Image (cartoon, rainbow, N blue to C red):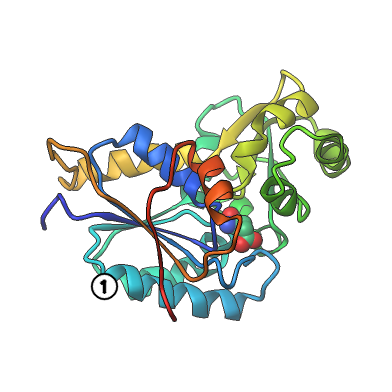
Amino acid sequence: MNADRPIGVFDSGVGGLTVVRALMERLPREAIVYFGDTARVPYGIKSVATIEHFAAQITDFLLGQNVKMLIVACNTMAAVAGDVIRAHAGAIPVIDVIEAGARAAVANPDHGGIGVIGTPTTINSNAYARRIHELDPSARVHSQACPLFVPLVEEGWLDHPVTRMTAQEYLRPVLAEDIGSLVLGCTHYPLLKPLLKDVIGPGVRLVDSASTTAQLAAESLQAMGLASSRAGPPAYRYVVTDIPLRFQTIGERFLGRSLGKVERLDW
Ligand code: DGL
């Protein structure tokens, strides 16, 4: 297989750009095709059947772009549609944020209790807790859905009293459980890191599933002999199903750099 083929990254909308940002930093030679289903976002409050259907469509689209690897950046899709995506992907390797986040959470042998936060669909699926228990059956996992975080982040309220109060409210039951780490199980949450650090205090480690996914992708590409060795800068494509007015601004906040051209797919 040609190692210079792009990596396909998919998400329900703009949030997966946090994973793209981490990939650009960790794997600067890799070309990326990003797919954001901005016409149908949010996924985090939708049913499993609907998400499976959407995820299968996106997988087929990305496979049509000749990708060498798929990265499921959306925690909600990874939580409930991982099997469907892998079945459609066939021989193309699939990496997802839940696998990466779960591995990072148990990596430290003294990890203590593990808190997991995410969208209602991710938390109700129990996917993080299941994977963490497969990796370490003795782990204590305390999960909490935080549905208001996605709109607060998209509003840009990253350091706002309303967001702080919301975080204190959501995290109260998790923090009462004596946790050693907190897994950010949603694409949007890495942007809340500074505020969350304040709320949880210095004793709790934050596990950022964006950077852990980039690390897992780097290891997997290396192990499979699929790492690109291209000399010049790689191509980045952004394909979305709708371009709302604020998309560019929000996207650049997630990506930490200018987005350039965004292609709209008419599905
Ligand atoms: N991308 C989703 C996730 O990581 C958050 C946004 C949504 O609900 O679609 O769970």
Residue 189 x %, y %: 64, 43
Q: Is residue 75 at least partly visible in the picture?
A: no
Outermost residue, top side: 202
Task: Kindly identify the residue that appears in the image at 46 percent across and 45 percent down.
Answer: 19
Quadrant (top left, top right, bottom left, bottom right) of the N terminus: bottom left
Residue 62 x %, y %: 32, 68
Q: Is residue 147 at least partly visible in the picture?
A: yes
Give the answer, above or below, for where 45 lies relative to 172: below
Task: Kindly identify the residue that appears in the image at 38 percent across and 49 percent down.
Answer: 260
Residue 160 x %, y %: 80, 35
Q: Mark 1 points at which residue?
A: 64
Q: In which quarter of the image is ligand 1?
A: bottom right
Q: In this view, does 245 lie to the left or right of 99?
A: right
Residue 99 x %, y %: 47, 49
Quadrant in which residue 171 is drawn = top right
Quadrant in which residue 28 is drawn = top left
Task: Kindly identify the residue that appears in the image at 69 percent across and 52 percent down.
Answer: 150
Q: How crowded is mark 1: few (under 14 residues within 10 Å), some or many (20 or more)?
A: few
Taking depth in this image into account, of 86 and 76 the one nearest to the observer is 76
Give the answer, above or below, for where 235 lies relative to 121: above
Q: How many marks?
A: 1
Q: Does the residue tagged 1 have its C-beta within 8 Å of any atom of ligand 1?
A: no
Task: Kindly identify the residue that appears in the image at 42 percent across and 45 percent down.
Answer: 20
Give the answer, above or below, for where 239 lies relative to 30: below
Helix, strand or loop under label 1: loop
Taking depth in this image into account, of 190 and 222 the one nearest to the observer is 190
The amino acid at mark 1 is Gly
Quadrant (top left, top right, bottom left, bottom right) of the C terminus: bottom left
Q: Is residue 39 left or right of residue 192?
A: left
